[in-house]
Amino acid sequence: MLASRPTRNESLEWEKTDDGEVQISIVRQETWKVRLLSKLFYIPKKRKITLDEVGTEVWQMCNGRTSVGEMIEKLSDTYQLNRKEAEVSLLQYLKTLGEKRFIGFVLQGEEGPPDPGAASGKKWVKK
Amino acid sequence: MVEEGWEEFGWQGLRLSVPADWNLGRVDGNAEKGYARLDDAEIVRAEVEWRKLKGREVSVPLSELVDRYLEGLKKKADKAGADFEVQRRARFLREKQWLDGFDYEVFTWDADFRAYNLALRFISTQRVVLLRVLAHRSEDMSDVVDRVFRSLRDQADAEQYLWCVYGLRFFMSSEYALAGHELKSGHIQLRFESGRKECRVHRLSMARLLLKGSALENWYPAFFKKQLRDFQTEITAELVEEHSGLRLVGRPRSRWRQLLRPLPFVNPRPRLFLDARVWHRQDLDKIGIVEHLYRKRDGASDLVDTVVHGHFIEEAEAKQGSDAGVATDAQ
């Protein structure tokens, strides 16, 4: 697990706000259930999730090149956390992101995707 | 003082030094009987089991307790069809002079890993401790094992115990027994009780993010709103161990006001007084909180100041330890 490299879901749109926080846009799925429910209730076509400072940092590290182990080191250095504290909270957070299909994991030996958005922080939309 | 790259672990009166990357992975039990496991990034590195001997067990030789323990392990290994080799009275320690006078046994067992074991009976407390360090079979851990084993202490007959976990360290009066703990990432809380008195020690990480620029005196009552709802509080800004902090004094709210709360007769809340210190260590990006709750108006003591003084302050440890009568050798 620690050697795996989390990578962002390429179909997601995200951008950085003026406060430097990452905002992920989630487009409504157009399944028949959602379409039916949207007739009865208001379901926005797109909703935005704003990550806090730590979430933003983790998101930016999910570039397919940084391993979970390296992320733990980085977080424990930046926020002066004990390694175990950083590990437990990071793994929980990555699990949540994984369950929501915001990220996937590149396993050891596999090649990660290029990451054009990470350096600039500009809007990054994958085709 | 602990050498660089090493940290102390202190729990239920036991303390030992371990490499800094060995962190608590699991802890169970109480002062009488318990278990703690320390892991590094890869594997379980150390396990400590302790048990207070009672009644007839006191006269049972330690070697017999080790026999029973190894029999249990052998059975488990046989069931799992795993190889299991034991070497009793193993000679992996450089010298054993420091163990003179103790009832002890050193042994190893090999399965998937090699386990270096020290079983030690502390005579004064009649606590038997089994300390085990695990290593890959190809790894030479003899230096580390030697050092970890040598550092094992039982403070159970001291006036104060060192509690040390995830870098949080403080001395707590031995009158107060651990009544609960929450070891969450970013918020470690240990709750101690002595009769009807209670002491809570908190350490919050990522203080800058928590405070978000607000002052400690505004943040603390908001963050602990629920816990403070039964108190009339008086907050004064003051330096705590040379760091910006607060002194908080709480009195129980009037009985009339408490009567207006839902179901006051079914679940009446005890009327408690509160003495607390809160401080922000900017250099460590952490917030420390020590709260003492007591029933009688004149029940205040210097407990909070004592805990605060020994909290995080590594330089003070040696002095504090000797002042508190922490045994350098708890035999």
Image: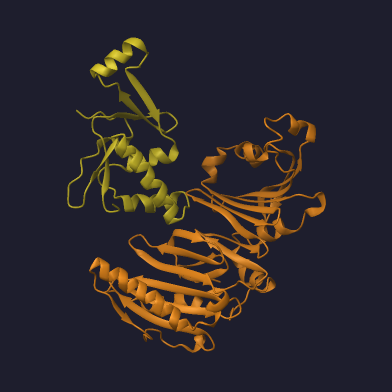
Chain colours: A yellow, B orange
Is B331 or A80 nearer to us in this picture?
B331
> Which residue appears farthest toward the right when viewing the image?
B298
The location of residue B281, given as percent across then percent down, is 59, 51
> Which residue appears farthest toward the front when viewing the image?
B56
How many numbered marks, from 0 up? 0
Q: Which residue appears at 31% of the width and 68% of the height?
A: B76
Q: Is residue A7 above or below residue B190?
A: above
Q: Is residue B276 left or right of residue B201?
A: right
Q: Is residue B239 left or right of residue B50?
A: right
Res A96 seen here: yes
> Which residue appears farthest toward the top when viewing the image?
A39
The location of residue A95, given as percent across then percent down, is 33, 42
Res B114 seen here: no
Q: Is residue B177 left or right of residue B297?
A: left
Q: Is residue A108 above or below residue B7?
A: above
Is B281 or B317 nearer to us in this picture?
B317
Quadrant position of residue A117: top left
Q: Which residue appears at 42% of the width and 55% of the height?
A: A84
Quadrant containing the N terminus of chain B in the rendered view = bottom right
Is A113 or B229 nearer to us in this picture?
B229
Is B169 or B72 nearer to us in this picture?
B72
The location of residue B236, given as percent across then percent down, is 74, 44
The location of residue B60, given as percent across then percent down, is 50, 82
Q: Is residue B29 left or right of residue A23?
A: right
Quadrant containing the C terminus of chain B in the rendered view = bottom right
